[in-house]
Image (cartoon, rainbow, N blue to C red):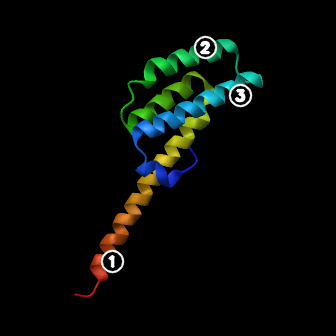
Amino acid sequence: MDENASVQGTTVENLKKQILDNLYDGIMDAMLNGRATLKEGKESAHFILGKFKDVNTKTELLQFLYDLSTKWSIYNPYYVKMKYSLAEADDTKKIQDLKSKLYKFIQPS
């Protein structure tokens, strides 16, 4: 999930697939490098599989990542990255809207 601007244009389903892959890679890496135990991996996998299917919006996706990161800190970077990606996408949209309004305002009749 390294494309902030494309978060805005990405469907929730595509984001979910991307995030699920990232979460899987993250927990596997954490377990292999001793930053997470097998028990934490299993528990978090059950949590992810149980809750992830109910996520239907970007807001729900962000809440899911928040809930996940509060239970297992290994997932905090995924929450933070998504939070700021969504904020940046929202800011970009606002700037584009303002540019458009300004252009219409200054355009000669």
Question: Which residue does the image show at 48% across and 52% down from the upper left?
Answer: 6
Task: Say what amino acid the circle numbered 1 marks.
Answer: Tyr
Bin the neighbour count of mark 2 within 10 Å (Cα to Cα): few under 14, some 14-19, many 20 and up.
few
Q: Position of residue 64 (x, y in %)?
A: 46, 29
Q: Which mark is residue 42?
A: 2
Query: Distance from label 3 to label 2 (Cα)?
Result: 14 Å
**Residue at the spot 49% in from the left edge and 26% down from the top edge:** 67
Of callouts 3 and 1, which one flags the residue occurring earlier in the amino acid sequence? 3
Q: Earlier in the sequence, mark 3 or mark 2?
A: 3
Residue beneath label 1, please? 103
Q: Secondary structure at mark 3?
A: helix
Give the residue type at disc 2.
Answer: Lys
Q: CA distance from mark 1 to mark 2?
A: 54 Å
Question: Horizontally, is 105 left or right of 7 in the view?
Answer: left
Q: Quadrant of the N terminus?
A: top right
Q: Secondary structure at mark 2?
A: helix
